[in-house]
Image (cartoon, rainbow, N blue to C red):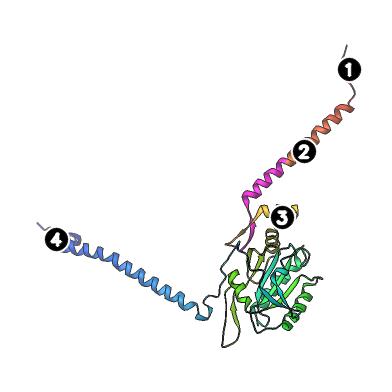
Amino acid sequence: MLTLKTAQTERMQRPGAQALTRLRRLAVVPAAVLLMSGASGLLAQSEDEKTPRELTGVDVVEHLGQKIDLNLQFIGEDGYPHALKEYFSKGKPVVLNLVYYSCPMLCNLVMNGQTQAFRKLKWTIGNEFEVVTISIDPTENFGLARSKKASYLNSYERETSGWHFLVDHQENVAKLAKQIGFGYRRDPATGQYAHAAAIFVLSPEGMISRYLYGVNFKPFDIQMALTEAASEKFGVSDRILLYCFHYDPASRGYVLFARNFMRGGGALALLIFGFVLFRLWRRERRVGFNHPPMVTAK
């Protein structure tokens, strides 16, 4: 009588087969660990290689709620030194941006983007808020600042005395950039600066209120950031908007806050409902007063 044996049965009957299988299974774990370690090492190495040494530290680290030193002085487009507190003494929020006037690309994109947004705001520079633009290049002079100011005021298409163009004085721009968290680096080979694309909104007291990123700024985001920074100095309609919207770091813009919107919408619905009931009650009373008395049948 022939006995048929499967391949599995033969393997199980071989000497040391089970031990070998167990060793193979145990070997899977360290192999996987080594593979993952190697992959993570390669990934880290790849990430390091993606960031050139020239761009190290070129980033924005947000310091929300911190106050800048308003005693720092810079040279204005008039050629005279001015302390930052001159632009923060008017009780208005301030849009601050750090650029350099001879920048061949990114600074111009940031400046053009914010100017386009400023044109669409219901607020006017100099009336409801101030704008301060400062060069990070210590070699640039006030003559270049004056030229840039004339160009952008012409592009703004509104009369204003509230947009100020400054250049560095006594290396104060480096101190200001550090306080804001704005990292930049000069390339010795080209003389150009690597930096991020961002503008900063500060309260009238010089407190950092909001960071807005990119080169295309939504007028609504700037309006909301200014309203937020202005604290109690805005109207009822702006306060309602600020209540219903909040800044979303993920989208880097202001989005509808559903909870506040529903809460505000519920209150609005109750007001409308109460008004309708009041009108109906008034109408019924008016009809009752004008209706002739009923005559009972005899």
* Magenta stretch encompasses residue 158: no
Q: Is residue 117 visible?
A: no
Q: Residues within 10 Å of mark 2 (few under 14, many from 20)?
A: few
What residue lies at 57% left-to-right and 74% top-to-bottom?
183
| Nearer the camera: disc 3 or disc 4 | 3
Look at label 2 and name its amino acid.
Val
What residue lies at 68% left-to-right and 78% top-to-bottom?
108
Q: CA distance from mark 1 to mark 3?
A: 63 Å
Find residue 40 and report its horizontal and vertical position in percent: 39, 70
Q: Is residue 274 visible?
A: yes
Residue denoted by label 2: 276
Q: CA distance from mark 2 to mark 4?
A: 90 Å
Q: Are marks 1 and 3 in contact (CB under 8 Å)?
A: no
Q: Earlier in the sequence, mark 2 or mark 4?
A: 4
**Most foreground residue, 295 or 100:** 100
Q: Residues within 10 Å of mark 1 (few under 14, many from 20)?
A: few
Q: Residue furthest bottom?
A: 189
Element type at mark 1? loop
Residue denoted by label 4: 13
Residue denoted by label 1: 295
| Nearer the camera: disc 3 or disc 2 | 3
Q: CA distance from mark 2 to mark 1?
A: 33 Å
The region drawn magenta spans 251-270
Q: Earlier in the sequence, mark 2 or mark 1?
A: 2
Look at label 1 and name its amino acid.
Val
221 lies left or right of 293: left
